Image: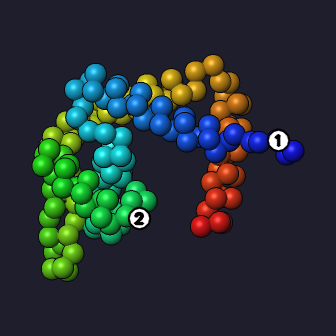
Amino acid sequence: MKDRRQGGFLMAKAHRVAGRVFSRLLRERGIEINSAQGRVLFALWREDRIPITELARRTALGKSALTSMLDRLEAQGYVERIPDGKDRRAIRIARTAKDRAMEAEYRRVSDEMTEIFYAGFSAEEIARFEKDLERILTNLERSE
């Protein structure tokens, strides 16, 4: 009988546990967004006022998932939808003052999460691990 590999199971489990830890750290700092919403905001921190279609591409979220996430972020005051000046049908997503005020603390939590994630790893081990994950991701993307 062939040995059963557990890489996929362990990655999925690590993802779930990391999400819970990250959410707890955010709540402890009074940040009221979840990690998926953070991914949307992070994309906006790199470039503000981008079209929804581009935001969907950068976050790898489907249009319906992104739309409902943007609805919640807008209701919480973190983003706003603004008309595109060149294309009346297009909408751009823009950051708000509330998002700008929260960004530095969110980044600190993200850095803390990275420290937790890599505790006990050497720089060489981290580099190898990330290189191996990139290979796994490439393999998976080829199979899509």
120 and 48: which is toward the camera:
120
Rendered residue at 67%/51% (across/down):
136
Image quarter (top left, top right, bottom left or bottom right) of the C terminus: bottom right
Q: Is residue 12 visible?
A: yes
Residue 120 location (% of width, % of height): 63, 19
Examine the rendered structure and indicate whether residue 12 appears above or below residue 27.
Answer: below
In which quarter of the view is residue 5 placed? top right
Identified at 36% across, 40% down, the residue is: 35
The amino acid type found where label 1 is placed reads Asp
Q: Can you say which quadrant of the picture contains the N terminus?
A: top right
Query: Which residue is located at x 21 percent, y 42 percent?
Result: 99
Nearest the camera: 32 or 16? 16
Q: Which mark is residue 88?
A: none
Would residue 58 be found to the left or right of residue 70 on screen? right
Please, which colouring scheme is shown?
rainbow
Which residue is denoted by mark 1 in the rendering? 3
- Amino acid type at circle 2 is Arg
Foreground residue among 72 and 92: 72
* Residue at 30 percent of width and 59 percent of height: 66
The answer to whether 25 is drawn above or below residue 46 in the figure is above
Front-lying residue, 89 or 2:
2
Residue 57, labelled with which disc? 2
Disc 2 crowd rating (10 Å Cα; few below 14, some 14-19, many 20+) is few
Q: Secondary structure at mark 2?
A: helix
Q: Nearer the viewer, mark 1 or mark 2?
A: 1
Mark 1–mark 2 distance (CA, rounded to whole Å): 38 Å
Q: Position of residue 114 (x, y in %)?
A: 49, 30
Q: Local crowd at mark 1 within 10 Å, few (<14), some, or many (≥20)? A: few
